[in-house]
Image (spheres, rainbow, N blue to C red):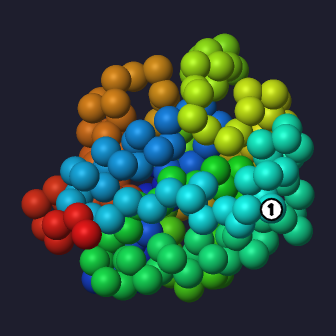
Amino acid sequence: MLTAVSQQPSDSSLPLGIVIMGVSGCGKTTIARSLARSLRVKFLDADKFHPPANIEKMSSGKALNDADREPWLDDVGARIAKVAQEQGVAVLACSALRRTYRERLKRASDMELLFVLLDGSKDVLQRRVGRRTSHFMPATLLDSQLATLERPDRDERAFAVNISQPVKKMIDEILQSPDLKSWGANPTAAEPEA
């Protein structure tokens, strides 16, 4: 399992973008929303910013290609930067499956991002995706996402959290990470959620 990377940011007063990442069914939205609530900051869901053509393509069971993703990632990166500039910290749920996607998000946001990979077994993920009824991503695309996933390398500011734990334990693990603490982010220091 990927362990926390404890590179120090050049200036801990800089805005922080936290990206909760992983494949469909790992709990990105639930964890990102809960983390944002704990930090009392705005939560962003990258899925809400897909253009209609991307949603239509995924809804029909077709995987997105890089040309589909690039403008979306640029838009999402700009959005997390805006919120982080306003609040000091922003929390985003975004698959960010490949390193090139994470790098694009960083370029588009023009800020340091902390990636938290929600990690779990294929069996657990399949059960979760199979139970969902209100999401445009069909269960049939899970294999494609797992094949696309490039776990963050040790030189990326990233760590993994096991999804088999209760939500509260996962949030506590994220809040106690050295990378998050190095920015001085804590549940009592952030502005109320907008």
- Relative to 120, 43 lies left or right: left
Report whether residue 103 is seen.
Answer: no
Q: Secondary structure at mark 1?
A: helix
- Relative to 93, 123 lies left or right: right
Which quadrant is the C terminus positioned in?
Answer: bottom left
User: Measured along the vertical axis of the image, is residue 26 above or below residue 91?
Assistant: above
Q: Residue 7: x percent and y percent? A: 46, 65
Return the residue nearer the eye: 105 or 177: 105
Q: Residue at x 65, y 19 (%)?
A: 130
User: Measured along the vertical axis of the image, is residue 111 above or below residue 73?
Assistant: below
**Rendering quarter of residue 180:** bottom left
**Furthest-left residue in view?**
188
Which quadrant is the N terminus positioned in?
Answer: top right
Return the residue nearer the eye: 125 or 115: 125
Q: How many marks?
A: 1
- Relative to 22, 85 lies left or right: left
Q: Residue at x 28, y 77 (%)?
A: 87
Q: Residue at x 50, y 43 (%)?
A: 28
Report whether residue 189 is seen.
Answer: yes
Q: Residue 181: x percent and y percent? A: 27, 59
**Rendering quarter of residue 50:** bottom right
Q: Residue at x 51, y 77 (%)?
A: 79
User: Measured along the vertical axis of the image, is residue 114 above or below residue 138?
Assistant: below
Write down the residue under mark 1: 53
Q: Residue 17: x percent and y percent? A: 44, 69
Q: Residue 8: x percent and y percent? A: 41, 70
The amino acid beneath tag 1 is Ala
- Relative to 189, 87 lies left or right: right
Mark 1 Cα within 10 Å, few/some/many (few <14, many 20+)?
few
User: Measured along the vertical axis of the image, is residue 56 above or below residue 60?
Assistant: below
